[in-house]
Image: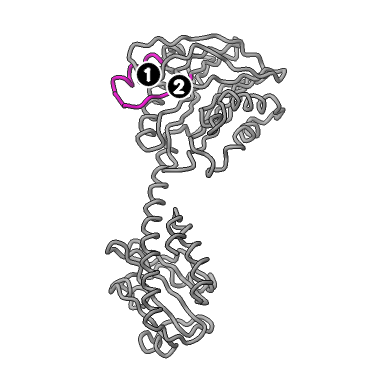
Amino acid sequence: MAATLAEAAGVRDVVELVADQIVPAFGPQGLVLMSADEGRLRIIGHRGYSREFVDRYDGTPLTAPVADAQVLATGVPVFFTSPEDLHRAHPHAPRYADRSAWAFLPLIASGRPVGSLILSYARPRPFPGAERAMLTSLAGLIAQALARARLYDAKHSLAHSLQTSLLPHGLVPLPGVGVAARYLPAGHGMDVGGDFYDLIRAAPGTVIAVIGDVQGHDPNAAALMGQVRTAVHAHATAGASPGDILDRTNRLLNDLDPDRFTSCLIVELDPARHRLRLATAGHPPPLLRGPDGRTRLLESPPGLLLGIAPDVAYTTTGVPWEPGSVLALYTDGLVETPGVDIGTSTAELSGRLARSRSEDLDALADGLIRHVKDPAHRTDDVALLLVRHEP
């Protein structure tokens, strides 16, 4: 049981593991797992009870004169060997179906009450001393796992909110420009990272597409990502060229001295002139699929990663952009696979882009990231931005 609970991440994992392991191993016909939250007991999982029955007792105050709350107040488990025992202690306690014995176990972690566990049995049960000691020890394991899981869920929620606030809430392209984007956090850690993308209205008739990757998968990486994205947005709306945007953003990062490096790719899209202009700071080169389906890498002078040295010149390169072409900007999480050469992975991505004939950019984006959707096998963030020059 200890080994199983050690593998639990969130509260839902703990609930499922406890219910799936205790019911068959320890013989109760019913189980209710409660979490102490803001002065009340919240039912977070149950087995052997109807939903209607347990919902009536969800939100019980911790001060209520009921066994599941009182064991948390005292820290001492309570065992009722028969219906008569329960009735003497709590005359108004409900009895579900044919239950005839109960164990009310407090869940205490590091001296703090985190919840309670109720086990019920169909027949009277004496609960000998060894069994009581075992169930009490079991409650201690569950309490520790539940405390860790609640902390994990809180961090996960914070990370998700942070990531959502830093990525664009919507991409509003120019007329004649189609766009789709995808972001997948790393499969391990806090689910927050430094990959980012953006689409920025710049000079009349043009739009700036941005994608980048800050080192790390933690709140510090996300915070730096927000600073980089803000700097790029400010310089892009001022009408700077892609190379100048990177140059100015790099100087800002060196002044901030973040002790982390950032790769970034800037592409200026000009559908009226059928032209792209791009500059890169050590970022993987974008892919361009022409209207005939042929796909190629858009190579340009790579430039240093942002934040390494203050005085770096980034070169802007021009490329024709035919109507019907699709430009794919991505971060290295999409093409880096342990044990596989990145050139091979990039060629496979290029092949998937070339073979796709979907007119729906969202369907195309889903197809390009399908092989990295499983978080168990994803060790890096993934960002993808597709831009099509509409005919």
Instruction: Please report the residue visible at 59 percent of the width from the left and 34 percent of the height from the top.
Output: 369
Instruction: Please report the residue visible at 40 percent of the width from the left and 74 percent of the height from the top.
Output: 135
x, y (%) of residue 382?
51, 33
Numbered-mark total: 2
x, y (%) of residue 104?
39, 76
Q: Does the magenta stretch include residue 252?
A: yes
* 389 shown above or below 61: above
Residues under numbered marks 1 and 2 in contact, where contact means CB atoms less than 8 Å apart: yes
Q: Nearer the viewer, mark 1 or mark 2?
A: 2
Relative placement, left or right, of 169 versus 387 is left
**Amino acid type of the residue that numbered disc 1 sits on in the rendered structure:** Thr
Quarter of the rendering occupied by the C terminus: top right
Q: Which of 51 and 329 is in front in this view?
A: 329
Instruction: Please report the residue visible at 49 percent of the width from the left and 70 percent of the height from the top.
Output: 22
Give neighbour class at mark 2: few <14, some 14-19, many 20+ (Cα, 10 Å).
many
Look at the numbered disc 2 and give the secondary structure of its residue: strand
| Separation of marks 1 and 2 at Cα, in angstroms | 10 Å
**Amino acid type of the residue that numbered disc 2 sits on in the rendered structure:** Cys
Q: Does the magenta stretch include residue 293?
A: no
State which quadrant residue 161 falls in: top left
Quarter of the rendering occupied by the N terminus: bottom left
Look at the numbered disc 1 and give the secondary structure of its residue: helix
What range is drawn magenta here? 246-265
Q: Which residue is identified by label 2?
A: 264
